[in-house]
Amino acid sequence: MLRLIDMRYLAACVVFSLPLSVFAANAPEEFAFQLRTLDDPDQPPDKALCDQQPFITNLMLGASVWSTRTDKRTGEVFDDTRRQVGTGTACFQLTDFTFPVGNEFPVTARFVLKDGTYTGTGICVVTSNDQPVKGLILAACTARVNEGPKGFKGGVATTTTVINVFKLPGFTTGSYLTIRGYRDPTRPWWRQVWRRFHSPDRDEDGE
């Protein structure tokens, strides 16, 4: 009897800890991707995308896109190329080749992933031009995601980015990418609850 009461209490705690949007009929479903992108000569950029931009593209990158694994206790990434999940293109208009901290430049990016294609336009801001070595460019980028697969309702993409424009040895151009957005519901609320507490990697140690 006590065990039954405990289970009911636990179930109630789980339900009330969930956002109300989970239960609202036809409410948009929130989703997120956390991925690694790497400049990849085997993945040519989509030149047509860059040619369509309202700015003049002077840096065009093609990338492979990867899932990652993190240590569940610290959150540190220990495998940033676990499995390739797509490809990407980034179109930049670099505006100052001295890359002063605070310099802004436009970007449009498209990511072709397993569940669909996402395209967004935004701004990158230089955060460093001398860490850990002079000439390596660190930047933060944000973009409004305007296009996605069927049912996509809009979202935002952010990156922490390294641009090795001067080809310094030992460093790779690429980003850690987050896409967060909304879409039409793809599963009933009870399946969202199940997925939240039974993700495939939840019990992996990462050691």
Image (cartoon, rainbow, N blue to C red):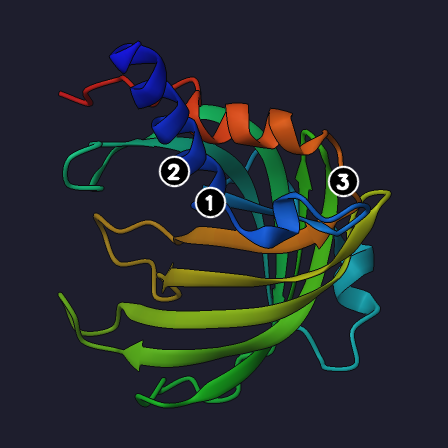
Q: Are marks 1 and 3 in contact (CB under 8 Å)?
A: no
How many numbered tags mark residues here? 3
Where is residue 196 drawn, in percent x and y?
A: 47, 31
Give the CA separation, mark 2 to mark 1.
5 Å
150 lies above or below 136: above
Front in this rendered view, residue 128 or 30: 30
Between residue 182 and residue 130, name the one nearer to us: 182
Report which residue position mark 1 lands on: 16
> Horizontal placement of 155 versus 74: left or right?
right
Q: Which residue is mark 3?
A: 185
Q: Earlier in the sequence, mark 1 or mark 3?
A: 1
Q: Which amino acid does the dot numbered 3 rest on?
A: Pro
Q: Disc 2 designates what residue?
A: 13
Task: Locate residue 191 relative to residue 172 in the image: left or right.
Answer: right
Residue 39 vs residue 91: left or right? left
User: Circle 1 sits in a helix, a strand or a loop, which is it?
Assistant: helix
